[in-house]
Image: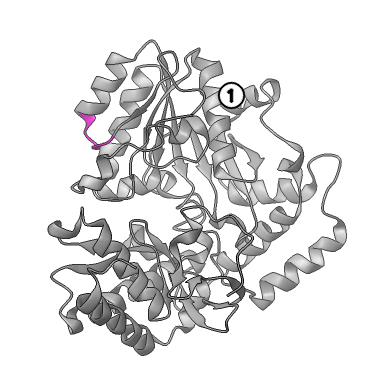
Amino acid sequence: MKENRTIHSKITKKFKTEDGQIVFQRGQGGEVQASDGTTYLDFVMGYGPVILGHGTESFTQSVAKSLLNGVMMPGYTSFHEEYLDRLLIGQPDRRGAFFKTASEAVTAALRLAAIETGRRGVIRCGFIGWHDAQIADSLKWHDPLASPLRYKQKYTANMRGVGDKEPALNWHDLSLETLEELIGAHRSTVGCLVIDAYQASMTTPELMRSAVDLARDAGVLTVFDETKTGGRISRLGYAADHGIDADLIVIGKALANGAPLSMLVGSTEHLATAEKSRLSGTFSKEMLAVYAALATLDDLETPRADYADGWAELGVIGTRVASSIAAAAEQTGAAPLVSAQPVMGGAMFELTYAEQLLGDRTRRDALLDSFTDAGILLLEGHPSFVCSAHRDTDWDELTRRSAKAFTQWLTTGAVER
């Protein structure tokens, strides 16, 4: 067997077979193919960025045509302006800053908050990026509130920019009382509250609005991190859909169907600080991702036969995927232990567990392996994603493969690979 040269992170090593790490070579629609020729139904979607599908013809042709204009100009272009006008339609007071990754955009938000408030500490709720202050002393944020795995602190050593003068604090339980205590205890050092929009799936819009109001009353700048949701569940994501008036929002992943693009969006007043705080880099003005984002908007804005737009269709597709997996769990007798449900309208979905499995890392990992063996790639302990091309899914085949995965897991799932 050929030895891999690529150094895989914990994230990229999730997908493996008995022969070792899966190496992918192409994707088409809602499927991907490994280098050994095996084809998988893909509900990982590059962890969320792919929203139209792999290798889709109209998207690829549109981006290829745009590339004739060039990839990099001395400054921002009419394509960047067009994209912002379309993304922020109906919001004339909003401005946007371009980045490649959401971790960069969140870092920019933290810097703006520190400049505006004079305080460098942050309270976070959810996974907000992989830079030091974003991940140090963090939790397993994608696990349910009742899971014991959620509350185990990670990445506690060798992280810069974290300490008594600039704490990174966890609002772990979505309780307003806890948030009030954190703000009260660290009022002199905390300048920013960052909420991962996925956490809203565990509570209500009313609580999220109250959290933003509570922080603002304390002079804390508020950021809604829509990296998973913005551009996927709707044009701007959960906060805009539910009237949550955060000072800044971060949008990423699904904006450009796999091309790297993230946005920091806020009022003219808040983003005016960007020009004096060096928030952009050389590739912030790169054009390939903006061409891809415009092509993605072209597709998603187009009404479908039965749907107002592509976002509405995605919600139906993801809901049907979750229903098919849940039906397979019922068929095989796995339903008392595990099922699947749509998240935030269905453009994402996730596996759900009985209480006795919430803290059982071994069996949960074994279930992911069983799905991979059955030809389905999805995420465990994290929402999975759908794309528009999944409209063409063979639903009977999805149920059959899911049933095969559950059967294997029920038989051998306690054995760690």
Q: Is residue 317 left or right of residue 236?
A: left
Q: Is residue 174 magenta?
A: yes
Q: Residue at x 58, y 72 (%)?
A: 24
Q: Which residue is mark 1?
A: 269
From the viewer's side, name the closer residue of 22 and 331: 22
Q: Is residue 227 magenta?
A: no
The amino acid type of the residue labelled 1 equals: Glu
Q: Is residue 13 left or right of residue 270?
A: left
Q: Position of residue 324 (x, y in %)?
A: 30, 79
Note whether residue 58 is visible.
yes
Residue numbers of the magenta segment: 172-176
Q: Quadrant of residue 150?
A: top left
Q: Position of residue 110 (x, y in %)?
A: 52, 27
Q: Residue at x 71, y 50 (%)?
A: 82
Reply above or below: 152 against 396: above
The 10 Å Cα crowd at callout 1, few under 14, some 14 to 19, many 20 or more, is few
Secondary element type, mark 1: helix
Prevailing SS of the magenta stretch: loop
